[in-house]
Amino acid sequence: MRRYIILIFSFLLVLSSCKQEEIFEVIYQEIAKEDLEIITEDIEEEIIGIDVVYKRIAVVIFQKGNSSGYYEFYKKDDKIIEGRKVVGTGSVEKIKYVRLGGGTASGDYPFAVIHVINEKMIEDDYTMSLIGDKGSKEVKFFQYAHAIETNEIGKYISYIIKDAEGNVILEDR
């Protein structure tokens, strides 16, 4: 019995000395392009964007009527696991450019979901700067929705949208 207690204590000691990031990387595998095909085949909503953040989280962004949201998927033991589904509702008629549609603001793997409302932003090479308390990150739009890693910007504060010439189109402060 004493050996089991020592063994369990040793395991917990090793586990507690690992960073959460290291544990995450041990538990979940990197998601490959082939995995994305498997992930999307059973989704009934209209997929408007798909991104892999931190190499290990597939974020599938969708819309259906007046609602939009995203799924999170992980890969463990060569199997795809659905993490969570986040859905928001509401009309986008009054929104001219983008809607920030969630994400994960805290923890070791934060990300933001951005839903492009205005097609002109994609066609005319608009960019968006996400601003946080530790810095900013520029996003170039190439699909209708994006999942963007935000660990380097810290806590989200605001965003600025610029056209191709660098003119500020919208500033959310």
Image (cartoon, rainbow, N blue to C red):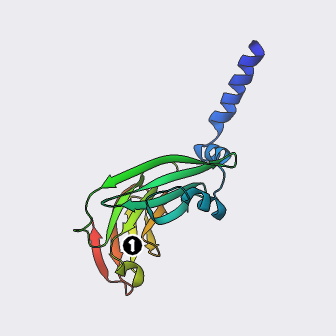
Residue at left offset 52%, top offset 46% = 83
For the C terminus, the quadrant is: bottom left
Q: Label 1 amino acid? A: Met
Specify whether 20 is left or right of 126: right
Q: Camera-side residue: 7 or 56?
A: 56
Query: Is label 1 in a helix, a strand or a loop?
Result: strand
Residue extending farthest top: 1
Number of marks in picture: 1
Residue at left offset 41%, top offset 50% = 86
Can residue 125 be seen here? no
- How far from the left and from the top, in percent, is residue 32? 65, 61
Q: Camera-side residue: 101 or 165?
A: 101
- The quadrant in which residue 128 appears is bottom left
- The quadrant in which residue 139 appears is bottom left
- How far from the left and from the top, in percent, is residue 80? 61, 50
For the N terminus, the quadrant is: top right
Q: Which residue is mark 1?
A: 128
- The quadrant in which residue 97 appears is bottom left
- How far from the left and from the top, in percent, is residue 150? 47, 59
Residue at left offset 27%, top offset 65% = 92
